[in-house]
Amino acid sequence: MNHRYLPMTEQDQKEMLQAIGVQAVDELFSDIPEKVRFQGELAIKPAKSESALTRELMQLAAKNADTKQYISFLGAGVYDHYMPTIVDHVISRSEFYTAYTPYQPEISQGELQAIFEFQTMICELTGMDVANSSMYDGGTSFAEAAMLAAGQTRRKKVLVSEAVHPESRAVLETYAAGQHIEVVTVPQTNGITDLTVLKGLLSDDVAAVMVQYPNFFGQIERLDEIEALAHDVKSMFVVSSNPLALGALTPPGDFGADIVVGDAQPFGIPQGYGGPHCGYFAVTKKLMRKVPGRLVGETTDDEGQRGYVLTLQAREQHIRRDKATSNICSNQALNALAASVAMTALGKKGITEIARQNFQKAHYAKQQLKAAGFEVIQHGYTFNEFVIKLNKPIKEMNELLLEQGIIGGYDLGRDYEELSQHMLIAVTEQRTKEDIDTLVKELSEHA
Amino acid sequence: MHKKDQPLIFELSKKGRTGYSLTELDVPEVDLSTLAPEGFIRSSAPELPEVAELDIMRHYTALSKRNHGVDSGFYPLGSCTMKYNPKVNEAVARYAGFAHIHPLQEASSVQGALELMYDLQEHLVEITGMDEVTLQPAAGAHGEWTGLMMIRAFHEANGDLNRTKVIVPDSAHGTNPASATVAGFETITVKSNEDGLVDLDDLKRVVGDDTAALMLTNPNTLGLFEENILEMAAIIHGAGGKLYYDGANLNAVLSKARPGDMGFDVVHLNLHKTFTGPHGGGGPGSGPVGVKADLIPFLPKPVLVKNGDQFEFEYNRPQSIGRVKPYYGNFGINVRAYTYIRSMGPDGLKAVSENAVINANYMMRRLAPHFDLPFDRHCKHEFVLSGKRQKKLGVRTLDIAKRLLDFGYHPPTIYFPLNVEECMMIEPTETESKETLDSFIEAMIQIAKEVEETPEVVQEAPHTTIIGRLDETKAARQPILRYQKKEAVEV
Ligand SMILES: Cc1ncc(COP(=O)(O)O)c(C=O)c1O
C-alpha cells in the first residue's frame, strides 16, 4: 500500500519478512485467537487526498461562528485575548511539539528549561513558592487541589463557593465521589461568596475552603477574610485564579493561600472549543512534595554545568504506582510553552497593562449599560466580567446578537436557576470602545 | 563536546524592554484603586522578563535546538508510539473555525465542530468495536480514571457494593494502579508467567466477588498479544467483574483485533499516540473512552447527540458519573486525530499496524543475537530486550541508553515494564523506513561490541551532547524549582 506516511516498499517488506523468518505478514498476527481476529474491512470513511480532505474540513470549520469574524463578549472561564504572533511560531517548532516528556535530559534541555521558566512565571503571578509543569486544565487542577488538601489534612470534607466556575465544581464532584470526599457548596449572594454562611459551615473536619478569584461572576472575593476563616479551623485555603487578572490583583499567595490553581488559557492559548488549555498548580513550599504531576528542577552535570531535570519523581505514578499523589502522566506541556512565550512577550510591563485594560474596559461597558437603563446586578468590585439582567431569555437575545455579528455573553440560567435572563458579559482588552458601544446599542434595540 | 549554557529568559531581561503590542486604551480611564477593594491591587508587578521580540525568538529557537523530537531523528520510545506527526493535522487544527470558537457558544453556531466530534466518535466506535465513545478525557490516565468511575457506577447501580478491587498485571503502566486509587479502588497485582503473559492460575487466585475490574493492555507492555484473552474475559466476567482495555498499544492491532470483540467492556485510546496528535513535549493528549451498551448510561455528561440534522449536547443523564473535564475534551487534539484517520482510511489503518509489527519483529530478530531476548516469540508493535548480559560486564541499560544519544537517537523506554531486568522497550512505529531501522540496529550492535571491548566508552556516555549526565540526586535533595534573582548581582 502506498501512503505518504508509510515508507515500507514491497521490496522492503519482502526482505524484512525474510529476516524475521516468516512467509507472510499474517503469520505475525497468528497469536491473535481466530475467534477475535478481525476479518474484513473497517466500516470507516475511505482515505482522502490531502487537498480533498483540507477542502472538506475547511468547509466544516466555516460552519462555525468564530471570534475572528465575530465580536465576542463571551468569557466564563475561556477568553479571547491578545495572542502574540510569536507564540504560534515557537510552538510550531517541531523539536518541541514532536518530542515527548523529557525523560532523557541531555537531549531535552530545551523543553526542561522552558518548563522551569514556566514554573517561575506562575510563581511570580500567584505569589506562591512552587508551581508544577502543568495540569490538564483549570477544572481538573481544581479537583486535584481538593484531593491534595484532603490527603494532607486527613479530612474528608471541602467547602466550595457557589461562585466558582460551575464546570470546575462539576469536575470536582466527580473526583470527590471517587475519593469519598464530601463537597459542601457555600452559596453566593449577589454574585459573591456568602461569608456569613461560610462561617457557619466551618468546623475542624473541613479539609479545604475553595474559592475563585476573580470569581465566576467576575467579582473580587475577599481573600483576606476567607483566609482567616479557613485557617482558623486549620483547613487549607485553595484559590482558583485567572492568572491574567493577577497582573493587577494582589496575588493569592500574599493572602496566605495554600494552593492556587487555574488555567493559563488567557496567555496565548486559543479558545479552541474548550481545549486543549493549560491547567496550572501552585503551592507553598510546605506542600512541595505533595504536588501532582511533573516538576522540573535545576541541577548540574558531571562537569558542574547548569542543567534541568524532572525531579521529586517519588510522588509520581511511574514510581509510586497506587500510592502516587495523582494519576496524571501526559500533561499540557506544549500549552505551558505557549503560555510562557505569551507571558514573556507581555513581560513585566505588558502584564500590568493588559490587566489594567481589562479592568477599565469592563468598567466602561458596565457604566454604559447602566446609563442605557440596564440592570447591572452586582454591587461589588469586578475584573473583566459582570452580570446584567435582561427582560428576555438569554438564548433568544444571543441569537439576535449573532445576526449582528456579536457573540453575546453567557446564559447564567444554565447553571443557576434563579439567574435565568441573566447574562455574564466579558470585556477583554480585545474589545474596542466601538465594539462595546455596538453591544450596548444592539442590546438596547432588542431589549 | 560543545557545551554552552543557554541563559534563562529572566537573565536576558533588561528593565524597560518590551515584547508586546497592545492597542492604546480607548475608553475613559478611572483610578484603578477605585475598581478593587483596598489592598487588592498589586503593590509590585510580577517579575516577568523584559525582552524584545527578536530576543524572545532567539531564546526559544536556541531552546528548541536543545531538544530532540520525532522530526529531529528516530525516537523508539516504547509504549509511547512516537510516530510521525503529519503537518496537515497542524494546519487543520489552526483553521479559525476550529481554533477560535468558544465552548459555551450556542450549539447552533458551532455545528461544524459538533459534526466533526460526532463523526470522530463514530469512527472510534468502529475501530474499537465498542458501542459508544466519549471524547471528554484529556489523556490516557484521565481516560482510565473515567472508565473506572463508570465501572464503579455500574456496580453500584446493581447494588453490588463490595467490588472494591481492581486487578492489574505486574507489567502494567504506573497510571493503571494510580487511576484505580483515584477512582477509590484497591489495586491487586496479578503475575505474568514465563511467556510474558498474564498467569491464568494467578488470575483465578486473585479474582473474586470483590473484583470490580481487570485492567489490561493488549498487546501488553512487553509487546506481546495476550492470546488467552477469551479465557481471561470469561474468568473476569464469570466473577461479575468488568474488563478494562488500556489502549496505549492499539497501534499494533488496528483492523486486526478490536477490544470490543475481545470481550472488553471499557476502552480508552491515546489519540496522541496511535492517532498522531503530537506529544507536545509531554502533552496535551486526548484520551477518549469507549464502552459497551450496558455502561452507556454512566458516560460522563454532556453526551453529544444528533437530532435530525442538528447536533447538540444532552445533559439529562441521571446515571452519568458527571463531568470529568470542563467543556468537551481536548478538541484541538481530536481535530488532529480525525484528520489523520480520514487521511488513512480503512486500508491505511490496516497497513499502519502491519508495518508497525513488521518493523518491530525485524528489529527484534536482528538485535536478538546481541542482547538478551526475554520472550522469544513474535512481538506486536514493540518488543523488550534485557541488558542482563551487558550488566554482567559492568554496563547498565542506563549507560546503553546514554550511549545511543551519541548516535543521534532518542533511546528506548528503559526500566519499564518492571518485570524485566535491565529492560529496554523498543517501539519503532510504522512511519520509519528500513534504512532508519538498519542504522539504529548497527548502532546497537556497535554498542554491544563496545560493552565487551571498551566498556568505559559506554559507561561514560554521552560524549557529544550539549550537556553531560545530570545529577538527579542533587536536584531532589536541594530542590531548585524556580529562578530566583540573585540580589548580589543587581546594581
Ligand atoms: C501503557 C500505558 N498506559 C497508560 C499511559 C498513560 O497515558 P497518558 O500519558 O496519556 O496519560 C501510557 C503512557 O504513557 C502507557 O504507555
Image (cartoon, helix red, strand yellow):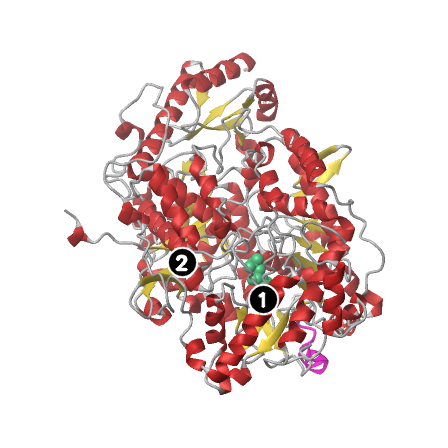
In the image, residue B252 lies at what x, y percent?
70, 63
Secondary structure category for the residue under label 2: helix
Number of on-image labels: 2
Q: Residue furthest bottom?
A: B392
In the image, residue A304 lies at what x, y percent?
29, 67
Question: Circle 2: is it few (<14), some (14-19), or many (20+) Cα within 10 Å?
Answer: many
Identify the chain of the residue marked 2, using the numbered disc in the image: A
- Residue B160 appears in the figure: no
Q: Quadrant of residue A349?
A: top left
Q: Which residues are magenta?
A: B198-215
In the image, residue B314 lies at what x, y percent?
68, 40
In the image, residue B117 lies at what x, y percent?
67, 42
Task: Inspect the magenta stretch and tell me whether residue B208 lies in it.
Answer: yes
A369 and A336: which one is in front? A336
Is residue B243 shown left or right of residue A412? Answer: right
- Residue B208 appears in the figure: yes
Residue designated by label 1: B439
Residue designated by label 2: A109
> At label 2, which amino acid type do we have?
Gln
Task: Inspect the magenta stretch and tell me whether residue A289 lies in it.
Answer: no
> At label 1, which amino acid type do we have?
Ser
Q: Quadrant of residue B316?
A: top right
Is residue A59 shown left or right of residue A226? Answer: right
